[in-house]
Amino acid sequence: RIGQHYNLKMHGDINLAPLKILTRNIESLRGEGSFAVDVSGNWEAPELRGRINIRDTNVKLEGRPYRIGPLSGDIFLDKDRVTFDSFNVDFGGGKIYVSGAGRLDKLALKGLFLSSEIKDVRFRPMEGVDTAFDGKLFFEMSPNRQSLTGDINIKRARYVKRIEWKSWLVGIKEAGGVPMSQPSFLGKTALNVHVTGRENIVIDNNIARTPVRIDLNVQGTLAQYGLVGRAETAGGTVFFRNNEFEIIEGSVDFIELNRIIPVFHILAETFTSGYRIRLNLDGPVDRFSLSLFSDPPLSDVDILTLLTAGHISKETKGIESGIGAGEATAFLTGRLQDVMEERFKYITGFDRFEVNPETTARGTVSPKITVGKRLLGDNLFVTYTTSIGASQENIIKIQYNLSRNVSLIGSRDEIGSVGADIKYRFEFK
């Protein structure tokens, strides 16, 4: 009786595609199912009993690059209670298993709790970043709030995007407070997700080649989230002004609940032309402190000259303006250089390709090209550096890793001297 009460028994098949029109947040929807549901009781607050089966469903959310599905599972209805049973979803090459329950009030969903188990999902959160992870996530919705909590364990991850130091730092500052675009119904979801990873997480680009361990909390909301925690490395190499620095200590701390504000601490050193140069980088992006020290001691200008020109001599005195011109050239052409070097790496297969300005002993600026390639299952790394228009020798460095802690290094420097080293690395607490 319309307006008074229900006494209906319904069953049939479902085509889910037309449901797309109910919301603008779904770009595409395909799927099938069946249902057998009884509706009884008062017109304003009926009771539902029965089962809805969903199978082979694929969903793509507006503005998101990933497709969700195939998705299959059962929904059981019992008066004002909704139970989600045995839902399994294919996503990113892995599986997500979902179960949970909700509460109905006058045919409207007023409460929902979902528990999910994630198995070997592969995901690309941004260009140049590939991850695979397991985990458990819990979604809770009530009339007053929505939340997403849980734990994510990164099984493997690799960051390979080429970065130009100056444009990268400017980019972080510009992006620090920019909210992410999310479907409106998810944007206010509060986050508290613990993300950890101890092995097989690698940065491998033109700035660094190093393994990383992470322990982070993702907090805030989906629309405006932040990171709290630390990422750290126990070794590896960082590249600065065309020189390879071995990392002694390295960490990045994140300290903001609603923004991504990294605070860097990097201590690294290199040997060049008989000098031990130590690099110390500390602070947040907008207040960086970069210090260079040498043994035997050199002035800041002499250290920069050594790293840029490759040597210190009487002839190099007075060429500080040339070094400044080289730095300015690198800054002004940084983004164009990014594109050119990345394209060259793609065509040739080199793991490292860089073009940097070099200041010669006469104070002129000429291009300095460095290429590198890993061989023999990444155990052998060969680096070759040449300066166009300069009379100095080409630089060759060969490093062979006998194990994780022992390496053999052979090199020829810019004055033609040939040498060899055995590098042994050890950790202690």
Image (spheres, helix red, strand yellow):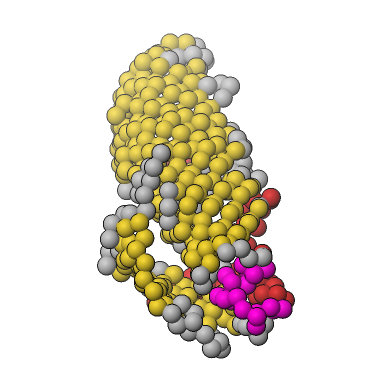
Q: Position of residue 362 (x, y in %)?
A: 65, 85
Which secondary structure type mostly characterizes the magenta part of the structure?
helix
Q: Is residue 88 visible?
A: yes
User: In the orientation shown, which residue stands out farthest toward the front?
Assistant: 296
Picture residue at 52% right of the left edge, 85% below the top: 392
Q: Position of residue 348 (x, y in %)?
A: 39, 77
Picture residue at 33% right of the left edge, 22% below the top: 76
Q: Is residue 128 visible?
A: no
Q: Magenta stretch: residue 236 in it?
A: no
Picture residue at 32% right of the left edge, 65% below the top: 408
The relative height of residue 147 versus residue 79 in the rendered view (above or below) is: below
Which residue occupies the foreground of this view, 114 or 397?
397
Which residue occupies the foreground of this view, 63 or 188?
188
Counting the numbered discs, the total is 0
The relative height of residue 117 versus residue 312 in the rendered view (above or below) is: above
Picture residue at 43% right of the left edge, 11% below the top: 41
For the magenta stretch, what is the residue range? 301-319
Which residue occupies the foreground of this view, 317 or 390?
317
Q: Quadrant of the C terminus?
A: top left
Q: Position of residue 379 (x, y in %)?
A: 30, 63
Q: Position of residue 265 (x, y in %)?
A: 56, 48
